[in-house]
Amino acid sequence: MRPRIGTSGLAAGMTCAQARETARLVLAEEDAPPALVSDVLTVVSELVSNALRHAGGVTGFRVTARSGQVTVEVSDHSALQPHLRPPSPHTPGGFGWRMVKALAPSTFVRSHRGGKTIVAPLPAHLACDRDK
């Protein structure tokens, strides 16, 4: 990835498809490797779908690409923190947050008036290592 910043965001109320397309455009400008694109799109899908399903929708979205890292930020109205659920064959779901934390281990939640923002930095070198 080139050492410059690419960023994009959309207004509140976006869909998963809009968020993925926004991320694709940012990553295309940065000529990101395929494995990194795949990881970023997975994180975007999980965070946006969770905001839609559990938090009343997306209130903010941003993807920033810098040399060595892509950061996904998704904001919503809920103050509830995401948490890992124990896997259960009897309860659907529960894998999204686990997947986000696996792909972006330093993900954190920033609480603020009116909700929260989940910040998921994805280190480019982890995905690039898989492309080799």
Image (tube, rainbow, N blue to C red):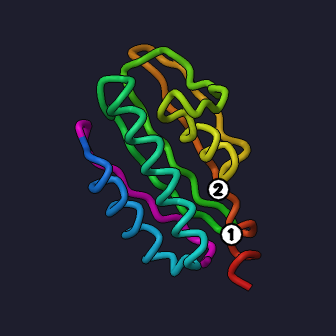
Q: Specify the quadrant that holds the N terminus.
A: bottom right
From this view, report whether residue 81 is shown above or below residue 72. above
Q: Which residues are magenta?
A: 1-13
Judged left or right of residue 27, residue 1 is right
Magenta span contains residue 84: no
- In space, the residues marked 2 and 1 are separated at their CA atoms by 9 Å
Sequence-earlier tag: 2 or 1:
2
Cβ atoms under marks 2 and 1 closer than 8 Å: yes
**Helix, strand or loop for the magenta stretch, by majority:** loop
Between 116 and 55, the one nearer to me in the picture: 55
Residue drawn at x 52%, y 51% as measured from the top left: 43
Q: Amino acid at mark 1?
A: Ala
Judged left or right of residue 121, residue 14 is left
Q: Amino acid at mark 2?
A: Leu
Q: Secondary structure at mark 2?
A: strand
Residue drawn at x 42%, y 50% as measured from the top left: 45
The residue under label 1 is 127
x, y percent for residue 27: 47, 70
Mark carried by residue 122: 2
Residue drawn at x 73%, y 45% as measured from the top left: 105
Q: Secondary structure at mark 1?
A: helix
From this view, report whether residue 71 is shown above or below residue 51. below
